Amino acid sequence: MSRLRLLAGRDITSGAEDFTEHVRRLGAQPAAGPALIETIVRSGLTGRGGASFPVGLKWKSVAAHSHGSAVVVVNGAEGEPHSKKDRMLMTTRPHLILDGAFLAAHSVRARQVVLYIGEEHEAARNAMLRALAERRPNERKITRVLGAPPRYVAGDSSAVVHLVNAGIATPMTTPPSPHERGVEGGPTLVQNVESLAHAALIARHGDAWYRSAGRRGAAGTLLVTVAGGVSGPGVHEIEAGTTVAEAVEMAGGVTEPARAVLIGGYFGSWVPAEHAWDLPLDSAMLRERGLSIGCGVVGILHHSSCVVCETAGIMRYLAAESSAQCGPCFFGLRALADACSRVAERGTNPDDMHRLHRWAIDVRGRGACHHPDGAVTFLQSALKSFPDDFAHHPAHWRGQGRQTPAGRAQGAHLDE
Amino acid sequence: MSRDVQFLVDRIRCDGHGLCAEILPELTRLDDWGYPIFAPGPVPDQLLPLAQKAVESCPVLALALKRAERHRTAR
């Protein structure tokens, strides 16, 4: 359960591993190229930013379009409110991420590497900059560092490309997708920091080694953020296939009986607690059950909380985080959030319940990016998992959005 | 041989003018905010002329007709 790979080595509370220590522990950066891409394909490694896309296939596609014009974007935007794993990995194991980035760059014959780090993740940014300064000059000179604005959509791969090209971190219409035509027109590999760190270890130890971790038939390890009603909320590295109950145990267990578990973050799903404990945390195994691992958030909601009010709070947050480019997302999510809030504040009513079900179907698939899809997936999970709560909700309001330092609606107060 | 043509919408460009739904109600309806929802699947051959007119009438050029991949031929 606690076989550490990404987080092996020095204790994670003692700061970043420097270059000397990193090389002493893991050896020099191994060779890159077409053979490495095949190894990563065989490992079955999937992306850890949310979409779980096979990493090897993405490298292959970018390499095929490259001709030396490709760009690798190291995605450390981490805009998901309850996720902490990317900034934690950047803060503690920056060289593992950089190894993965330069291995990817060599393998797809990229001319540039962009470190794209959330503006508010200051410790992570500093650790990555210090680590970059320790790297070889030929790596430093192809690397630039850009800040990701603190918006939910800023981590979307087309938004990353838009920011680099035009200074605006809003999603763009696809096709062409970034891996075909992205930064400055070159094919662009946008890869989450955790995915790159795994690739750096697979390059050293091989695909069979990667698959040798994992439980209940799943392969590898992953970082999860256990948030909400547990004694020790935070980031843990778990073997894929570890159950929700086991992950919650690693975070010190629940502090009160749980009502619901949010699996995968705000684009994920509410699952009634009694059905959640035995779920295996693995992208493929969750997909078989109609769920998604997303960015690895496991959020515990206490029995004393109101799932309708929490859902309304998160919908208000997601509506506010629309980049306001596509009508069905901008107007649709706002209308859904308003209807959900009316049910939460004034009590349930058939008109709003009908609207929630109908609009959730209407909005899906009608944005340039997946923001509206993620939001309605989340809403539909609430309607499906807690039909009685919505049908009998009294007029109360316990889920009002807090304000973050930046003054934005925070959504749920899972971590109170 | 069916040409298997589908609508391709640029969701960012679309401003909900609604001309497509006026011209081709058979395949298009407007949502509660005035943005078009297209029927899934290929455009039937007999509706292709109207579909073409809908594309040409869009004031913000948000609509296109796209041949499905497997029927793509050299032009």
Image: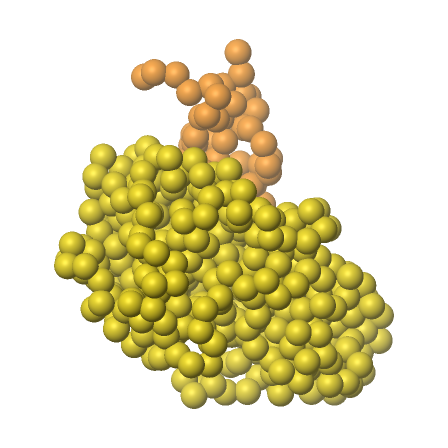
Colour of chain B in the image: orange
Q: Position of residue A360 (x, y in %)?
A: 65, 58
Quarter of the rendering containing residue A134: bottom left
Q: Residue at x 53, y 11 (%)?
A: B1
Provide residue A305's location: percent of width, then percent of height: 74, 83
Inspect this view and state whether residue A296 appears: no
Q: Residue at x 29, y 67 (%)?
A: A19
Compare residues B57 and A245 and report the one nearer the observer. Answer: A245
Residue B3, visible in the rendered structure:
yes
A365 vs B12, left or right, is right
- Coloring scheme used: by chain
Judge left or right: residue B31 versus residue A129: right
Q: Quadrant of the N terminus of chain A?
A: bottom right
How many numbered dots are placed on residues in this image? Answer: 0
Q: Nearer the viewer, residue A205 or A278?
A: A205
Question: Farthest front residue?
Answer: A24
| Residue A396 as seen in the image, left or right of residue A63 | right
**Position of residue A148 in the picture relative to residue A312 (left or right):** left
> Residue B25 at x, y = what percent?
57, 39
Q: Position of residue A284 (x, y in %)?
A: 64, 48
Q: Is residue A203 above or below residue A405?
A: above
Viewer-side residue, A223 vs A312: A223
Front one among A363 and A222: A222
| Residue located at (52% from left, 52% from top) | A51
Q: Colour of chain A?
A: yellow
In what quadrant of the picture does the C terminus of chain A appear?
bottom right
Q: Quadrant of residue A246?
A: bottom right
